[in-house]
Image (tube, grey):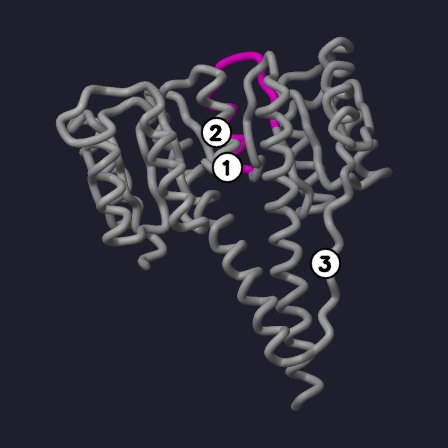
């Protein structure tokens, strides 16, 4: 299975070739399909690590476009290979957006797709896939060498909310409290940095535009203190440039306001999962190195 192989499932030949050119330039090998049935056949034949699929398209060859057909493909692919990474594009109504995420899509991007965002999301999606595979292999390896391994502690369910609007801050507070999180609250970027330094929560949820230092500056400062921290950015404006900049800096997700509770909590779990996987990878390598030193 080629780790940089992508299956593009898109009914529009122009968009399909545009995606193909983008991925080829980024060093990927591409497989192409024009509908859901063809996409499933190609997947079964080649088992690519990544699938980028349109949401609304013909289910089978020659069929009419069906709303949510990409979700059907997502379900079948994930049933056959739980390690398969799927990114869904188009059809951004709230119901299908949340359903696709709950069914295991790594991300759901709106059309027209921003190419920088797509490549960043693809890299993060493949990173997550690799981390999950590595964790499984690490645990098997540690079992093979019959050493007692330290069971990794799950990330604390603590979140720092940085939001200058009082009502929005309280709404976010209630969402996280209802989901079992302990919350730290800050009114602006400077308060946020101080609260982070004092509490070191594993997750920061921050508005992009605030009085004082911006959300981007907050990201830079908290990562200077702890580069393991997971960050989710909230924005009320469709500022693509700033959103892409925050993703490039390392934010796990950018979510538009008004915030959908299900989307926020799914993004939170994914962000904390990525943080934990990266920590486990580092701890595993440290543990393995310690074993090698003692065995030498």
Magenta stretch: includes residue 239: yes
Q: Secondary structure at mark 3?
A: loop
Tell me the residue that label 2 is attached to. 244
Q: Secondary structure at mark 2?
A: helix
Magenta stretch: includes residue 103: no
Range shown magenta: 233-249
- Tell me which label, 1 or 3, sits earlier in the chain: 3
- Image quadrant where residue 39 sits: top left
Q: Secondary structure at mark 1?
A: helix
Tell me the residue that label 1 is attached to. 248
Seen in the image, is 109 located left or right of residue 185?
left
Task: Look at 63% across and 74% down and name the residue there.
Answer: 143
> Which of 201 and 225 lies nearest the eye of the viewer?
201
| Separation of marks 2 and 3 at Cα, in angstroms | 32 Å
Where is 7 relative to 234, above or below? below
**Position of residue 223 measured from the top left corner of the image (x, y, whole percent):** 67, 42
Task: Look at 64% across and 61% down and name the residue there.
Answer: 282
| Residue 21 appears anywhere in the view | no
Tell me the residue that label 3 is attached to. 152
**Position of residue 55 measured from the top left corner of the image (x, y, whole percent):** 34, 25
- Image quadrant where residue 53 sits: top left
Q: Give neighbour class at mark 2: few <14, some 14-19, many 20+ (Cα, 10 Å).
A: some
Mark seen at residue 225: none
């Amino acid at each position: 299975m080629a780790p940089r192989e992508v299956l593009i499932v898109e009914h529009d030949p122009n968009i399909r070739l545009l995606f193909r050119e983008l991925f080829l330039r980024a060093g990927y090998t591409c497989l192409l399909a024009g509908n859901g049935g063809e996409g499933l056949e190609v997947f079964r034949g080649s088992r690519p690590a990544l699938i980028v699929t349109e949401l609304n398209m013909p289910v089978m060859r020659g069929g009419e476009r069906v709303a949510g057909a990409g979700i059907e493909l997502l379900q079948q692919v994930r049933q056959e290979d739980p390690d398969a990474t799927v990114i869904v594009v188009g059809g951004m109504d709230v119901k299908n957006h949340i359903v696709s995420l709950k069914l295991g899509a790594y991300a759901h991007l709106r059309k027209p797709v921003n190419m920088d965002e797509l490549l960043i999301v693809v890299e993060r999606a493949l990173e997550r896939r690799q981390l999950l595979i590595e964790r499984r292999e690490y645990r098997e390896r540690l079992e093979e060498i019959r050493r007692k391994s330290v069971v990794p502690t799950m990330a604390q369910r603590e979140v720092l909310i940085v939001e200058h609007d009082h009502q929005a801050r309280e709404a976010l507070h209630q969402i996280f409290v209802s989901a079992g999180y302990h919350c730290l609250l800050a009114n602006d970027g400077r308060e946020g940095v101080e609260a982070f330094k004092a509490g070191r929560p594993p997750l920061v949820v921050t508005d992009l535009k605030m009085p004082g230092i911006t959300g981007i500056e907050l990201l830079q400062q908290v990562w200077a203190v702890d580069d393991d921290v997971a960050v989710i950015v909230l924005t009320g404006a469709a500022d693509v440039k700033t959103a892409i900049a925050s993703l490039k800096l390392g934010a796990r997700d950018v979510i538009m306001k008004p915030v959908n509770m299900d989307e926020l909590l799914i993004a939170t779990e994914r962000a904390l999962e990525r943080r934990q996987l990266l920590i486990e990878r580092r701890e595993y390598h440290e543990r393995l190195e310690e074993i090698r030193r003692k065995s030498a």
